[in-house]
Image (spheres, coloured by chain):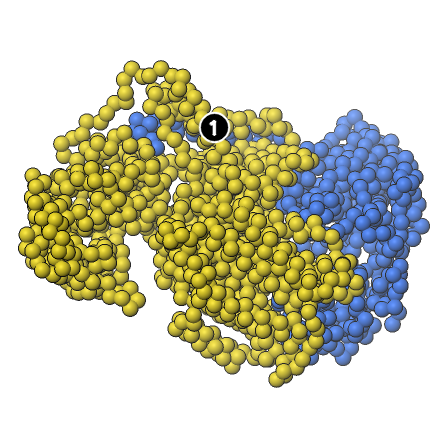
Amino acid sequence: MTPVRALPWSRRNTALVAIGLVTAVVLGTTLDAPRQIVFIGLVEGLSIGLLALGIVLIYRTSRIINFAVGSIGALAASMLALTVINYDWNYWFGLALALATGAAFAAVMELTVITRLFTAPRVIVLVATIGIAQLAELLRISLPDLGAELGARFPLPFTGEWTVAGVRVSSAELIVLVAVPLIAFGLAMLLGHTRLGKTVQASATNADKARLSGINPKLVSTFVWTLAGPLAALSTTMLAGTKGQLVGLETIGPATLTRVLAAALVGSMVSFPRALVGGVAIGVIEAVIRFNYPAQGGRIEALLFIGMAIAVWFVSRRDRDTGRESFSFAPRVRPVPEILRTRWWVRNLSTIGAVLGLLLAAALPFAITLPSRQFLWSHVVLSALLALSLVVLTGWTGQLSLGQAAFAGIGALGTAALVRGQTLGVGVGSASFDVDLPELPFVVGVLVMTAVCAVVALAIGLGALRVRGLMLAVVTLGFALAAQQYLWRTSFFSGGNASSVSLPRGKIGPIDLSSQRTYYWFSLALLAVAVLLVARLRRSGIGRIIIAVRDNPDSAAAYTVSPTRAKLIGFGLAGAIAGFAGGLIGGLFVTINFYELFDVAASFRVVAIAVIGGVGSITGPVLGALWVIGLPAIWPDNAVVPLLTSSVGLLVLLMYFPGGLTQIGISARDAVLATLARRAEPPASTRPTVTPRADVTEQRTTDLNADGSVLTTRNLRVRFGDNLVVDGVDLSVRPGEIIGLIGTNGAGKTTLLNAIGGYVPATGRVELLGRDVSDLSPARRARHGLGRTFQAATLFPDLTVRETVEVAAEARHRTGLASTAFFLPRGFTCARRQRAVADEIIAYLGLGRYADHFTSDLSTGTRRIVELAGLIAINQPVLCLDEPTAGVAQREAEAFGPLIQRIKRDLDASVVVIEHDMPMIMSISDRIYCMEAGTVIAEGDPKTVRSNPRVIASYLGTDERAIERSQHSERKTSP
Amino acid sequence: MITTSQQAKYSRRIPTLAVLAACALLAAACSSSDDDTQGSSPSTSPGSVDTTDATEDVPLELGRGVTDDTITLGYVYLDLDAVREKGLINLNWGPQGDHVQAIADYINANGGISGRSIEVIPLAIDPADASSAQAACLQLTEDNEVFAVLGALRGDEVLCYTEQHDTIAVANSDMTQERLDRSNAPYASVNAARERVIDNFASEAASAGLFDGRTVAVLSVDAVDVAADVAIPALNDAGVSVEFESLIQGDGSVGGAAAELSVNVESMRARNIDTVVVVGDGTVAVNTFIREGFFPRLFFTDQGVATTVAARADLSAFDGVYTYGGPTPSERFADPRFQEECAAPWDTLNPDAATQDPAVVPEGEPNHTTGLLVACRALTVFAAVAKAAGPNLNNATFAAALDGIGAFTLPGTNAASLGAGKYDAEDDLRLSTYNPDAADDEPDFVDFTG
């Protein structure tokens, strides 16, 4: 969970304001900007900033980006306009009702929708807020029409206009100028300096710990949403007041929403002051640019997107997400009951379903012969293909994109450009030149743009490499807007046309793609290939490492998996699929209207398809596309269908089936299998067991440091802010040694291991197996021989035990993307070897009965053994174990001493182990380091350390029984 | 999770799925030759004999959708019910499918077109659904193989017919030179093409001296290309120098456009702009002008926009407001040809839902006049050209007729013509000016008389 920023004005805020002022001065001097323009920008910026505060308020508390903030506000503002204009209410009564409407709507939504999704992935909740926004919009539309007279304007408490220092100030602007800073200040005070605020802060920082302190996080969430409702109402009311428009005030479009999110990003999504300053900066800078370059043709949106990408980069550098957020998008598929595993059809149920589905879909044109219906089915198929990109991006990497339609647009319009042989302008100004591209066949064009989209997705994803969750969503929303407002207008994509380009489908050899039926089959075949490819990748090491990095990047790195590589594969793959789908969608429509097919709303629709179907499942997009695109197309006049596909349908579905429609199918499948299992006769024999080989490790050579050690730290220091957590630690581990690391809680033991592993920034030197690894990433240190287990032993909740060990086996047999994707022999060989390694180690550690269980379903003790199994799979010469018995029952804990020694012996490894179990640590350790306040206060053999007065005073205490227990345990468990 | 043995089987299944995919492609290949309906070459009807012209012994080459007795037409219209339900626009033109059917019945009752009766397939399009128009296009061109499509073809939707499917289109409006250039099939418009309206507007307003001594800006919201490629060149050609261009590509929301407009108003003030030519939707712009106290001389290139704005805002403070276009809805309603050929057929069948002057239709009630105007005028244009094409009706004869028809009568207007290079019918275009003293039942704009 991102730590909540200090609310009072900080040095960073001061610096930001200074930068903003300098920018304003520079702009003001270099560009001609009258004061009135700057003032307009200031008011606009404050309005944006106020909306951003609403986003920040919710995000601080629950890490939800609330896309409904504008719509809730618009509903409330409409109530104000309605009561004042239609029913002649006093303004203040109308405003009170508007605020109450905002509060009531937000509270009801929180209590009915958000609470129910409290533990669901944040991406799912974000989509739910989009549904809430649509619901608010529906309610607003159902309000009576405003009976406004000619020229009526949005109600204000007072009207007037004044000129101050040459600047005209209207009453609406004056209200914004005064009220917004006050509201921001009030919010900062409320949440930063009151008991209530501290409660909110505590709940946001760590909900579990807050519960222990008697705080109810759900209640806190309800409170914050109820507060956010009136805030949204105030924001929109003021915004509408400054615009003065009665007609159309309701919609806060993607342009405003993107600016609001950009402002919130400036505040790292958690800082009120910085979000407000961000809003003002955006407003002023934009106004000055617009004044000087009125015909800017979407360049501001392009600049905004670039700015957002940079902001996310900085946010990710500062606020690295290490939280325990849930990313389990896919409903858990229970293992096939043992008793049914001998039945081939049970084992292959999903394959049988897929083949039957494919056959049914392939036969569809024989039943549906009208070309227009075949077009609609092709649309369903290709929408599923586009949504499949989100399964990879969101379901696997945990990142959400709100710009998939923009990638699809690049695919479609780029293919059209390649097919017509467009000229591509390269360079800027006088340094530019034109490249005449050759006219390519349709299919070749689609493939080229698929590759281009993969590269674009990689470039955009680079900024979000270090963050999880929703930051990429914000950046990709900016990308979608920039594409809609700028990119599509460039001559390469538009072909010089106003709003559409043509993309003739052409032929593939003898196959003419021009008929709807042919194109349907063509699309279906490619969807099947894409699904097959994605399914294969998911079941391969590629899918496992991406999910491992999503679930636990630190543990993945400890297993030598590079989080960067895994995420980039996910980003690139998702971009490629979106671009591929886009090219085919372009071919489907032939006349591609880029403002309608690939706008921001289309990107939201792709998310809805993926989430409704089930973003964690490969079949989810197909179900989602059938639901969202298929149902209205199949039954256009049915009265129930619009309800099912509406915001209400979306919300109900998410509330009861957050795993999407797939969840229903999986539940049914599990129920059927359970029933069959109850009726089935017990099998004659149980499944064959794997006989472990004597040696589960591979031979390796080990280099030593200059001093003969395998691991050495010199003057290692770690600083968190003003706290020096590790203070000049020198540590040395010799070959074959077990080093015990003891000390009180907060002594710096775990941080020391983190510094050794590269998980926290540190100064000093770390030498590992003859090499200085101080500047290496955790994954590269792991690849150099450093093993690591973690105190939490979270592992990878969405992977099974076997998959977890297979992730570790990547160190021995790394999965290649190309060999896996293209079904090359090397891919199969690698998979077989990984599996063999995993099966042997699982058998070796007696984990066979848990092999197909998800690690999150295991007891802590079993999970810790799985973690050790991973280390065996990697075959690391140096192991750093952080409290391997923490959270383990005493009986299980006692087994860990011998187990560690056995692993040490089998791997021929050296071990550093943090442990509070004094009998165990004293019994297995060759030497002990005792830490206090970040420094080593004693070092030596267990006997020496145990008798060290500082150790006794600092850690063991004067309890004779504790000392005696540690003495008696010495070497008791030695082999 | 797959086991090693399962994985081996899985790899064996790949060929199975590949075969299925290949079968799909093969089936596609087989099918492509027999159901390729994209594009259309005129079908031959050997049994048909033209009995009315000189080609007596030559078999007719009738176009797709044309038989000896019938001409099948598609008619598309906006699904205003869906639009209303989504809160987009509160318009109600009544049952537009019934409107066009009534007019078709009237034409058929009066002998049809060259002895053939018209069969109309009406289809509603949801403008909020990008695939709706495309599906309708395929439904008409491929499922029903109509000869021509008429009605509300918005923006580039017409290209699905004229560019993709070689199907004649008689659109109500939205004709542009780009769309004409991209069309393969004959394409006509009932109302005047955008370029012609703006060209005539610029030249007539300039001739009337309305730009003399003025500092002119062009402002557009969501019509950047029209402003840049049509309006500004037209003004320049008319000798008007454009001093400021405010081209706003909005995001579809009022807030987004209004934020930009506030800045642009100041920009115009700083440049002493006193005349603004509004291209595209001007509602938000005018409201912003009023809020900012900026009252230049206003020109609306789109008469519909001007009428809508005038209905919502008081424009009397501006230094003159002008627009250009055809007769007002009330004038069209009063036209005897409309009454006879459009209103009467409907009113006879639907005495309880008879047409009224649009200016007096109560809010919320269906405005049948507008629905009938669109249907009736489109069918009239089609019928005029198709009759001129003679019995051998196909794309080529229709195109030839389109080039040579000249002036003809069109309900709701005083002048209409079609000819080579001029495929937009409406000729009754005039410069009009805002009348601040208009009563509620009077039009807001009156003819400009100098």
Q: Residue at x 76, y 70 (%)?
A: B298
Q: Nearer the viewer, residue B211 or A50?
A: A50
**Looking at the picture, does residue A937 appear above or below residue A631?**
below
Determine the image quadrant of residue A836: top left
Residue A513 visible in the picture: no
Q: Is residue A880 left or right of residue A183?
A: left
Q: Is residue A283 left or right of residue B57?
A: left
Residue named by callout 1: A668
**Looking at the picture, does residue A744 appear above or below residue A18?**
above
What amino acid is labelled 1 in the image?
Answer: Ala
Q: Nearer the viewer, residue B57 or A18?
A: A18
Q: Residue at x 17, y 38 (%)?
A: A895
Where is residue A123 shown, x and y percent of the image?
47, 48
Q: Quadrant for the N terminus of chain A, please.
A: bottom left
Q: Nearer the viewer, residue A891 or B326?
A: A891
Q: Residue at x 43, y 42 (%)?
A: A329
Q: The chain coloured blue carries which letter? A: B
Determine the image quadrant of residue A666: top left
**Looking at the picture, does residue A750 appear above or below residue A831?**
below
Chain under label 1?
A
**Label 1's element?**
helix
**Badge 1 density bin: few <14, some 14–19, many ≥20, Cα 10 Å:** few
Q: The chain coloured yellow carries which letter? A: A
Determine the image quadrant of residue B436: bottom right
Residue A656 visible in the picture: yes
Where is residue A245 shown, x and y percent of the image?
69, 64
Where is residue B33 shown, x and y percent of the image?
59, 30
